[in-house]
Image (tube, rainbow, N blue to C red):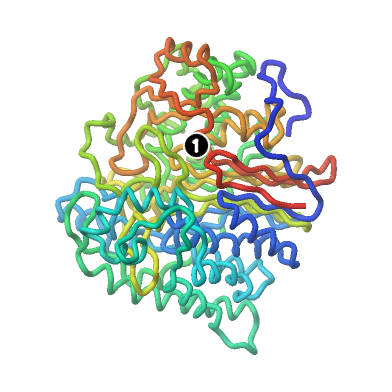
Amino acid sequence: MSSTASADFTSPPADRTRPELRGTFGMAASTHWLATATAQSVLERGGTAVDAAVAAAFVLHVVEPHLNGPGGDLTAIVAPAGEHPFVLAGQGAAPAAATIEHYRGLGLDEIPGAGPLAAAVPGSVVAWLHLLATRGTWELRDVLAPAIGYARDGHPVHENVVRTIRAVAPLFKQHWPTSAAQWMPSGRIPEPGDMITNAPWAALLERLTAAGDPAGTREARVHAAITLWTQVVGEAVEEFVGTPVRHSIGGELPGVLTAADLVAYAPAEEEPASLTFRGVQVLKAGLWTQGPALLQSLAILDAVAAERGDVGLDPSTALGVHTITEALKLALADRDAWFADPAALVARRIDPASLLADLLDPAYAAERAALIGETASREVRPGRPGGREPWMPPVREAGTAAAPLPGSGEPTLDRAGRQRGDTCHLDVVDCHGTLISATPSGGWLQSSPTIPALGFSLGTRLQMMWLDAASPSALEPGIRPRSTLSPTILAREGRVVEALGTPGGDQQDQWQLLYLLRRIVGGYEPQQAIDAPMFHTDAMVASFEPRTVQTASLTVESRLGDAVIDELRARGHAVTVMGPWSLGRLSAVGIDPDRGWMFAAANSRGHQGYAAGR
């Protein structure tokens, strides 16, 4: 990515955990090998990157049900060959009955992290089908065939799925019997490697493939499937959520999602937010995601480097870790004060385009960079972009809030960062030059009771909204929650060259920032940047219940080394040392325009992600 690596940077690791794949035909990478294999098989049979990505995404719904599902959300950036990239916004909005008054009337101070009251309108399936209808080439029956096969005939369950089921088994047995019936048949928790099925979901997918007039167009048949999905799922959801069920806050409450909410939903294609850093254009989704915080972090670090050189941008040194962490704290504080659905900003007389421009303005970045001192900050410090006064979210230290029930928050992600693997990610590039970076999530098996007629759960993205009307991200019907889902596309000299991303909740853009610094400034190859030691901070208001802060926290892989860790502690960071290969789930694909080949790289952590291609 960088023609000349910075002399101030640590050299790339000599060894790699995986080969960096290179070829000229097509590449795929994802957080699960079956999704990667599915995407590559579609490319091999003449499908495009769009066909491959949609097929892989529906497989992820089946094989990573603890990390995403049909009832969840999607954020993707699509770069069609020869066209301008666009954001595919598959994030549903708050239902029509989801008002602050209603939730406060239930005695709630914040939105639960699990249960139907946390559900936004499911957006993922409709967004993927929209993409297939407008940009794909394959028939829906062919695209969905792999997912139908795995759901109907079974697939070997991964140990992480089993671990999740085991963790929430008491909740399922006592309060969510429909989930127990789906994931613990005959009352038994599956063992790793057992073949598991999802017959209701397979049946619904088969119904979708039969929708529409066989004599009509492919596009019309996919749109007919969207209509059928909306009708069938809307009716089942409305009937199911009307019955009170256990939520993470402990009460038995009904949900508010209705069939009319699903009818009102449509995915959007939006202009990406972008920043050019060292000659590389970094494209992210807009202010309804946390994506612009990555752009802000790069702008702040560029301002730091202008004064002190690149030595503070190296994620493998104590100075670099300190500087990057402090920049992230500032950017994420702005995220929590300012980021929201543009419609909500407009309602508050804030122009979204002007706000984004002010957040990324070099003068504002320099102002924020000047706040970085020699020791770890213990404050949450949102800024005043364009002179605006920030809304300040509640700042509660972790450990002071009541513990939520199992199933809340981000899946497989505990408060100390000890267990990673949350959400999914996939990247695809085809021989035509189309690239896709997609991060599907939500609708986890542990997020809400399984709807028996459908075989899946609703999502919990509303927990990222506030029951405070003063917040830009306040709960409001028709408004999207500020999502953590944050894929990335890179362009150079006007040409898209790379798609990347990672699961990780609040850590997604933190881990991607380290990758980008190593790629762009350090000159690392993709697999080297993925393999290099990772770290992150939780010193911001968490996006997930119970929305707490871990002041001065810094979680690092032990491979950073004792000397670096000791210096970080001396600088005041509350360092938690994790295993040597425990943080991050990055994958990437791309095109090297100078050398004429494609590449793919995937994460070895968790023994699950894979890349494929030729």
Crowd rating for badge 1 (residues with CA inside 10 Å; few <14, some 14–19, many 20+): many
Residue tagged 1? 293
- State the residue lying farthest toward the right: 595
Q: Position of residue 93 (x, y in %)?
A: 39, 59
User: Does residue 550 appear to the left or right of 592 in the view shown?
Assistant: left
Left or right of 61, for residue 408 = left
Q: Is residue 599 left or right of residue 310?
A: right
Q: Which type of secondary structure does the marked residue at label 1 adopt?
A: helix
Tell me the residue at 52%/24% (across/down): 324
Residue pictured at 45% horizontal, 40% vertical: 420
Q: Position of residue 517 (x, y in %)?
A: 62, 29
Residue 67's place in the image compared with 183, above or below, is above
Above or below for 31 versus 574: below
Q: Is residue 179 above or below residue 402?
A: below
For image coordinates 49% across by 80% down, the residue present is 207
Residue 351 is at least partly visible in this image:
no
Residue at image location 34% in from the left, 24% down from the top: 551
Please state which of residues 599 and 434 is positioned toward the viewer in this rendering.
599
What is the three-letter code of the residue carrying label 1?
A: Ala
Numbered circles on residues, count? 1
Please state the horizontal and vertical placement of residue 280, each as a whole percent of the image: 69, 36
Foreground residue among 159 and 611: 159
Task: Mark yes or no: residue 149 visible.
Answer: yes
Question: Quick one: quadrant of the N terminus?
Answer: top right
What percent of the width, then of the height, locates residue 53? 62, 60
